[in-house]
Image (cartoon, grey):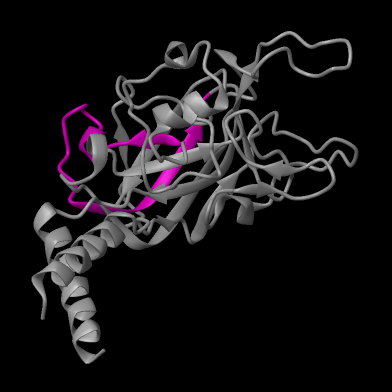
Amino acid sequence: MNRNLLRPLLLDAAALVLTLPLQAQYASEVVAYTPGTGVATEFGTGLPYSLTAAALGEPSRVTPGMFGGPVDPFAPPYLRDQLLSVGAGGSVTVKFAQPIQDSPLNPFGVDFQVFGGSGFIVTNAFAEDFSYIGTPATDGTMFGAQDGASRVSVSADGVTYYQLDPALARPVDGLFPADGQGQFGVPVNPAFTELTFAGKSLAEIRALYAGSGGGMGYDLAWARNSSGGAVSLAEINYVRIDVLSGRAEIDGFSAVAAVPEPATWALLAAGLGLLGLRRATRR
């Protein structure tokens, strides 16, 4: 076998592995739901956003219907069958079929994400024909975001729950608005704030997301017991959201897909390279 042919085969195999999408997993069951006070209602019908199935499975990539379209940070999901609303005093608890692990390989230490219905406000002025002047951009302000307080708790057995440190766990249904073109198992840099996105267009927001599909990220290392002490949780299966004030809309939950170690990538690439070599030899 000519070495000049082997090298591009291995490089092509490595490039293929590096572009494979990470496989995220999503909440599979709503264990409990209490609507609370002030849940959102659908325009026109007046029906509440209380369909629990809206919080299960993959978050929305597209909003269907005449006025729908691709979901992005400027155009979040808004239909009743896309969002589950939780009002003040309400809560929702979901279960994952496979455990969410506290993995050191997860980007930024984030182990799972919660997706809501918030979006960035486009602050460009409108022209007389209602088109944007220039490229649509935001100043970092948001619409549809939770303006109250929420509590995030986790459990391994569905019985004993541990609250995530409120000093570290941001409220749900705020940052980071979902992007249907991104990967829901990849978190946004949690150091970003609303000001990070000031003046940014959709393309620039996506550059900051770096392939992520958005969602607020949480770390299992933030778990605390009733006395405020740290709790070591290797993995959990349940996530509970309590809305203490205001209102939150939930589109979905995602476990973060751990990034394989370099050695794993190398083994996969080598395997694909050998496969290509075998096929080339047969030719």
The furthest residue to the bottom: 282
Frontmost residue, 250 versus 69: 69
Frontmost residue, 110 versus 134: 134
Q: Magenta segment: does it hold 243?
A: yes
Q: Residue at x 60, y 17 (%)?
A: 137
Q: Residue at x 88, y 16 (%)?
A: 129
Q: Is residue 78 left or right of residue 16?
A: right
Frontmost residue, 191 versus 273: 273
Quadrant the N terminus occupies: bottom left
Frontmost residue, 225 versus 167: 167
Quadrant the C terminus occupies: bottom left
Q: Which residues are magenta?
A: 215-244
Q: For residue 278, which quarter of the picture?
A: bottom left
Which x, y percent locates residue 27? Answer: 46, 56
Identify whether 273 is placed above or below 228.
below
Q: Residue at x 50, y 56 (%)?
A: 31
Q: Magenta segment: does it hold 222?
A: yes
Q: Residue at x 60, y 48 (%)?
A: 60
Which x, y percent locates residue 232? Answer: 15, 43
Q: Is residue 73 left or right of residue 23?
A: right
Which x, y percent locates residue 261? Answer: 14, 53
Q: For residue 110, which quarter of the picture?
A: top left
Q: For residue 124, which quarter of the picture?
A: top right
